[in-house]
Amino acid sequence: QVHLVESGGGSVQAGGSLRLSCSAFGSIFYINVMGWYRQAPGKQRELVATITSSGNTIYADSAKGRFAISRDNAKNTVYLQMNSLEPEDTAVYYCYADRTSVAYWGQGTQVTVSS
């Protein structure tokens, strides 16, 4: 089992920045992909960004140029630096980890961006 603990959500005004963190605990060996998804009210959960253990990244189009994902393998932690936030970024952000093709999710952290 993998337990994911998120932190760093909050409320900011448009144009502001937030940094999300997610640490993995438990059976952390063989975790390959880690990343972030988000779910806005009334919408499906969607990819924000992912990063592999070797550092390869994937970003949603909405995140490119504004968000940056990084990872500290020694700390089993993934980060999401979010800049130039927009009201459309308001959502619950979920940490994600893939371990031997099994998906694990964090409890979610709220990000609210006001105009």
Image (cartoon, helix red, strand yellow):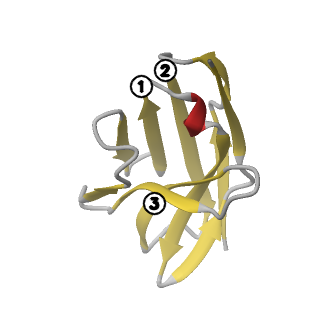
Position of residue 75 measured from the top left corner of the image (x, y, whole percent): 46, 45
Residue indicated by mark 3 = 34
Residue at x 48% of width, y 84% of height: 101
* Earlier-in-chain disc, 2 versus 3: 2
- Label 1 is placed on what type of residue? Asn
| Local crowd size for mark 1, using a 10 Å CA cut-off: few (<14), some (14–19), many (≥20) | some
Give whichever of 18, 14 is nearer the camera: 14
- 31 relative position to 90: left or right: left
Q: How many labels does the image show?
A: 3
Residue at x 75% of width, y 57% of height: 42
Which-is-in-front pick, marks 1 and 3?
1
Residue indicated by mark 1 = 83
Q: Are marks 2 and 3 in contact (CB under 8 Å)?
A: no
- Label 3 is placed on what type of residue? Met
* Earlier-in-chain disc, 2 versus 1: 2
Where, by quadrant of the figure, is residue 32 drawn?
Answer: bottom left
Element marked by disc 2 = loop
| Local crowd size for mark 2, using a 10 Å CA cut-off: few (<14), some (14–19), many (≥20) | some
- Label 2 is placed on what type of residue? Ser
Looking at the image, residue 57 lies above or below residue 92:
below
Residue indicated by mark 2 = 17
* Earlier-in-chain disc, 1 versus 3: 3
Give whichever of 58, 39 is nearer the camera: 39
- Between the C-alphas of marks 2 and 1, the distance is 4 Å
